Amino acid sequence: MGRHALLSASSSRRWLNCTPSARLEQQFPEDGGSIYAEEGTAAHALAEHKLKRLLKKRSRRPVSVYDCDEMEDCMDEYVSFAMEQIEKAKQSCKDPVILIEQHLDFSRYVPEGFGTGDLVIVADGTLFIIDLKYGKGIAVEAEENPQMMLYALGALELFDAIYDIERVSLIIHQPRLESVSTWEITVDGLRKWAEEYLIPRAALANKGQGEFVCGSWCRFCKARNQCRVRAESFLELAKMEFCQPALLSDEEIAEVLKKADELAKWAADIYAYAQDEAITHGKHWNGFKLVEGRSNRKYSSDEEAAEAAKAAGYTDIYKQALIGITEMEKLMGKKKFVQILGKFVYKPQGKITLVPESDKRQPVETADAEADFKEE
């Protein structure tokens, strides 16, 4: 499309929770984009090509510097999953509408709002919105996901007058994490969310009004390093004067646990910002200086070093190790890997860890946790 939406679907979780952030970000220059974003774009282009070819549509294979076996395998997995969803739709609908990388306009609800749906399937009574995520950091959940809900609203603008759509199925496929998240909502429920929550919040965000609210959505905000509200929320912990944990109340410890992870990320963001300012703009920070970091010795040429060592009579100069399970599975393919090495692979019990209740993993019994902790 070439233009950037102020209230984009991809950043909707942030501007819906922190309405002034969208306008605040405009004060900061456009960044060049990260290699992760570029890699994700390349993955989507490859997935689009593969899916179109399977659907007998014309497509030229994209070429990217990020092309690799992992991306090839992951996109094959995504396309296979997408084809399964298409076949399921055909079971209840003779001729479902299938759209790939479809422009979706939801400006009826969000000023100048638009986005791109990776795969949209319109079947009898059900609208399917399928989104590919190539990231491998955190599994993204479909439940009440505002980006997906905005895509659904945009798709309804196209098809609701033509088809009798009663429900929407939102599906996020993240092949690198082997994660598939699905959530269903009625069209009435989606429209109620739009009328009661989305429209008023989007209006505030478009005007740059409302209250600043910090949270996990701050991670990709351009203003995160200089946001005073975010800083104040973390500096509240300083009021505890770094007491020993045993001297804090249960409520105080719970509050620290809620903020600890974000606090660590905030501190890392501040450090990265300060270092960049010092290196690229000559900024001096009181009490700090730039130095050359420690480095490890390296051979200028592995081949020449090996030849010289051999010429001097040294032969035991190489190490050999079995490649990792993931690499071995890619080498053999999943089916052959299970046949040949399946009996030699096991998954040990994970280390007992304290996490928020929102974590999807099943809780362990206190007695079992105590026993495991004592065994370490």
Image: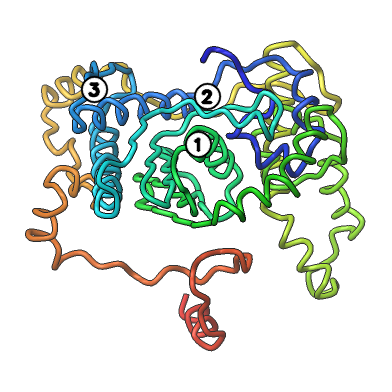
Decide if residue 366 is on the left or right side of residue 197.
Answer: left
| Image coords of residue 69 (percent x, y) | 23, 33
Q: Which residue is mark 3?
A: 302
Judge by depth and name the residue closer to the eye, 238 or 126: 126
Kind of residue indicated by mark 1: Ala
Secondary structure beneath disc 1?
Answer: helix
Q: Nearer the viewer, mark 2 or mark 3?
A: 2
Secondary structure beneath disc 2?
Answer: loop
Q: Is residue 40 above or below residue 129?
A: above
Secondary structure beneath disc 3?
Answer: helix
Q: Which residue is mark 1?
A: 155
Q: Would you call the spot at circle 3 few (<14 residues within 10 Å), some (14-19), or many (20 or more)?
A: few
Kind of residue indicated by mark 3: Asp
Q: Is residue 322 visible?
A: no
Q: Nearer the viewer, mark 1 or mark 2?
A: 1
Q: Is residue 14 visible?
A: yes
Sequence-earlier tag: 2 or 3? 2
For image coordinates 42% across by 46% down, the residue present is 128
For image coordinates 33% across by 23% down, the residue present is 66
For image coordinates 18% across by 27% down, the residue present is 56
Q: Which residue is mark 2?
A: 34
Question: How far apart, in angstroms, are the residues tagged by discs 1 and 2?
Answer: 29 Å
Q: Is residue 345 above or below residue 72?
A: below
